[in-house]
C-alpha cells in the first residue's frame, strides 16, 4: 500500500512544481508586458510631445512671454500665503527698497499705446535744413489798400530726408621741396598714417564695410553689388582681405579691452557654433565655436568674441586666466574646470531653466495647465522681485531677495522634490525638472550675493547679432578670418553696449590706431573715453 502511494505523491509534487514554475513564468511575462506597455506609453507620449512641439515651432509664436491667472494654477494655496505682504516687515527695508516698490507699482499701470497710423516725432538731435517758402512778391500787399504785409508767424512741418551714400576719392597731394641751388635734400611731407598702408581703403570705407557686414549682417557679395551700383567695382575678395587685415590690426586694442574685462566683478560667458571651411587637420563641415565674454560696470561694458575650434573646458581656462570674480553661464559643464581651478563662484541662468518649462508647456495638450505652468509662474515671481531691485545697492538687493526670493525658492524646492520622480525622465517636463534639479546649486547662488544677476541674458543679447549674421554669411573660410571677425564683432558690440554708434566708433579707432606708437597707451581708444558723455 505504501509503495503504491509513493509514486502518486511524487507525481502530484512534480505537477505542483510545474504549476508553480508556470505561474512564476506567467508572472514574469506579465511584468515584462507591463514594462513594455509602460515603455510603449512613454514612447507614445514622447512622440505626441515632439509632434506638438514641432507644430508649435512651425506655426506658434516664438515669444516666451507667459500669462496665466492665479486661479488656473494647480497649486495655489501656498502661493497666496507667500504673496501676502507683511507691512511691519516691509518698514525694515531701506529707502531704496521703498522706492523700488513704488517703481513696481508704477510699472503695473497699463502702458499708453501709440495710435496706429499717427506720425512719430522726428529725433531732435538730427540736423535740420530749413527751406523757406515765401509768397510771391505781388501777393505780399493788401488787396484793399496795397499796404505791405508783415510776417506774423510761421507754420512749420518736417519731413525725413535721406542723403544716399556717395562714393568719392580723396587725393593726398604731398609737395616735394628741394634747394634750387644745390639740388639736394629733397623734402616731402610724411604720408598720412593708415590702418592698411598698402591699400586704397580709407578708415571711413573700412568702418562702412565692417558695420554693414558685422552689425547689419550684409554679406560681402551684396556689398560688392551695392558698390557696383554706385560706380565702383570692389571685388569680394578685396573686401574680405580688408576685413581680415583690419581685424588683425585690432589685436593690441582687443588685448587692452581684455585686461579691463578681467578686472570686472563678474563676467557673463556663452558660446555658439561656427563652421570654418579651411582648417588644418579638420573636415570642412567640422563644428567650431565662437566664445563670448561680457562684463564691466554700466558705461564701461566690454564684450569680447574669441574663436576656438574646440568647446572643451581648456578654452574658458585660456580666456579667463587667473580671474577671481564671479562667473555667470548657462548649464554647460565646460566651465567647471576654470571654476575649480580659480575657486570662483559660478552662477546659473534662470532664463535657461524657464525656457525648458516653456517647452514642456508647449508640449501639453491645448487648453490644459500642469506642472510646467506652475513652475513658469514661480520663476516669473522671481523676476518680479528683480524688477523691484533695479537700481538698488548689492546689499539692499540681497536684503530684498532674503525677504521675497528665498521663500519662493524654498517653495520651488519642495515642489521639485515631489515632482521630479512623478514624471517620465525623457518627457519634456521630465527634462525640465531634471535640469532644474541638476543646476539647483548654481541657480540659487544669487540668493547669497547681491551682485549676481538672475540670468545670463546679457551674454545672450550680445551674441545674438553674431547668430543673426551667421544665417547670412554661413561660415568663415579660414581660422585667420574667424579671429579677425571676432575682433571686429568685439568692437561693434562693445560700442553698442556703451551707447555709441558702431560706425562712428570704428571710424575713430581705424583713424587713430595707426597714429599711435607701439608703446603708446591704448586707454584713449576705450569707448568710454572717446565721448565725454554717453547717451542715456
Image (cartoon, rainbow, N blue to C red):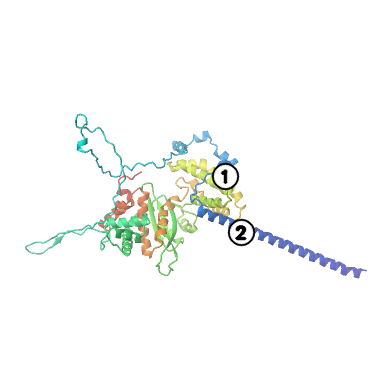
Locate the C terminus and report the quarter of the image it occupies. Answer: top left
Q: Could you tell me how many numbered marks the image carries?
A: 2
Residue at the far top: name it. Answer: 145
Residue designated by label 2: 43
Q: Position of residue 365 (x, y in %)?
A: 59, 51
Secondary structure at badge 1 equals helix
- Which-is-in-front pick, marks 2 and 1? 2
Q: Is residue 288 left or right of residue 198?
A: right
The answer to whether residue 315 of the structure is visible from this angle is yes
Q: Reply above or below: 276 against 145.
A: below
- How many angstroms separate mark 2 from mark 1 (CA)? 32 Å
Q: Is residue 158 left or right of residue 16?
A: left
Q: Is residue 366 left or right of residue 258?
A: right
Q: Check disc 2: other Cα within 10 Å, few if <14, some if 14-19, many if 20+.
A: some
Q: Position of residue 363 (x, y in %)?
A: 56, 53
Q: Position of residue 230 (x, y in %)?
A: 28, 58
- Residue sitting nearer the eye, 523 or 344: 523
Q: Check disc 1: other Cα within 10 Å, few if <14, some if 14-19, many if 20+.
A: some
Q: Is residue 256 left or right of residue 65?
A: left
Residue designated by label 1: 411
Amino acid at each position: 500500500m505504501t509503495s503504491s502511494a509513493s509514486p502518486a505523491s511524487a507525481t502530484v509534487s512534480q505537477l505542483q512544481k510545474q504549476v508553480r514554475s508556470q505561474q512564476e513564468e506567467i508572472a514574469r511575462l506579465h511584468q515584462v508586458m507591463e514594462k513594455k506597455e509602460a515603455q510603449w506609453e512613454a514612447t507614445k507620449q514622447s512622440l505626441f510631445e515632439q509632434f506638438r512641439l514641432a507644430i508649435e515651432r512651425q506655426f506658434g509664436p516664438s515669444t516666451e512671454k507667459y500669462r496665466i491667472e492665479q486661479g488656473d494654477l494647480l497649486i495655489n494655496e501656498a502661493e497666496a500665503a507667500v504673496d501676502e505682504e507683511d507691512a511691519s516687515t516691509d518698514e525694515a527695508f531701506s529707502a531704496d527698497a521703498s522706492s523700488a516698490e513704488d517703481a513696481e507699482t508704477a510699472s503695473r499701470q497699463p502702458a499708453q499705446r501709440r495710435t496706429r497710423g499717427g506720425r512719430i516725432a522726428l529725433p531732435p538731435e538730427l540736423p535740420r535744413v530749413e527751406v523757406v517758402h515765401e509768397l510771391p512778391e505781388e501777393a505780399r500787399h493788401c488787396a484793399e489798400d496795397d499796404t505791405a504785409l508783415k510776417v506774423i508767424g510761421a507754420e512749420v512741418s518736417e519731413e525725413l530726408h535721406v542723403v544716399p551714400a556717395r562714393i568719392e576719392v580723396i587725393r593726398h597731394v604731398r609737395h616735394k621741396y628741394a634747394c634750387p641751388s644745390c639740388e639736394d635734400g629733397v623734402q616731402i611731407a610724411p604720408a598720412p598714417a593708415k590702418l592698411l598702408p598698402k591699400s586704397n581703403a580709407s578708415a571711413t570705407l573700412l568702418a562702412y564695410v565692417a558695420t554693414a557686414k558685422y552689425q547689419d549682417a550684409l554679406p560681402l557679395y551684396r556689398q560688392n553689388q551695392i558698390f557696383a551700383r554706385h560706380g565702383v567695382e570692389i571685388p569680394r575678395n578685396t573686401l574680405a582681405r580688408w576685413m581680415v587685415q583690419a581685424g588683425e590690426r585690432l589685436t593690441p586694442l582687443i588685448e587692452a579691452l581684455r585686461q579691463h574685462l578681467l578686472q570686472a566683478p563678474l563676467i557673463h560667458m556663452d558660446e555658439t557654433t561656427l563652421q570654418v571651411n579651411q582648417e588644418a587637420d579638420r573636415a570642412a563641415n567640422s563644428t567650431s565655436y565662437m566664445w563670448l565674454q561680457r562684463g564691466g560696470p554700466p558705461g564701461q561694458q566690454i564684450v569680447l568674441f574669441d574663436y576656438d575650434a574646440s568647446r572643451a573646458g581648456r578654452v574658458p581656462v585660456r580666456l579667463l586666466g587667473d580671474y577671481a570674480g564671479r562667473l555667470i553661464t548657462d548649464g554647460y559643464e565646460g566651465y567647471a574646470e576654470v571654476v575649480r581651478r580659480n575657486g570662483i563662484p559660478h552662477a546659473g541662468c534662470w532664463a535657461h531653466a524657464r525656457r525648458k518649462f516653456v517647452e514642456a508647456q508647449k508640449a501639453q495638450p491645448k487648453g490644459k495647465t500642469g506642472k510646467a505652468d506652475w513652475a513658469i509662474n514661480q520663476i516669473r515671481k522671481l523676476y518680479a522681485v528683480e524688477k523691484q531691485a533695479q537700481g538698488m545697492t548689492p546689499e539692499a538687493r540681497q536684503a530684498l531677495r532674503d525677504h521675497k526670493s528665498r521663500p519662493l525658492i524654498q517653495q520651488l524646492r519642495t515642489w521639485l522634490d515631489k515632482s521630479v520622480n512623478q514624471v517620465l525622465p525623457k518627457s519634456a517636463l521630465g527634462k525640465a525638472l531634471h535640469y532644474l534639479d541638476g543646476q539647483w546649486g548654481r541657480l540659487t547662488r544669487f540668493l547669497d550675493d547681491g551682485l549676481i544677476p538672475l540670468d545670463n541674458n546679457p551674454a545672450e543679447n550680445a551674441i545674438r547679432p553674431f547668430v543673426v549674421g551667421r544665417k547670412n554669411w554661413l561660415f568663415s573660410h579660414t581660422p585667420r578670418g574667424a579671429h579677425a571677425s571676432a575682433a571686429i564683432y568685439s568692437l561693434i558690440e562693445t560700442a553698442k553696449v556703451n551707447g555709441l554708434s558702431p560706425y562712428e566708433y570704428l571710424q575713430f579707432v581705424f583713424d587713430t590706431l595707426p597714429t599711435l606708437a607701439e608703446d603708446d597707451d591704448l586707454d584713449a581708444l576705450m569707448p568710454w573715453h572717446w565721448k565725454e558723455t554717453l547717451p542715456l
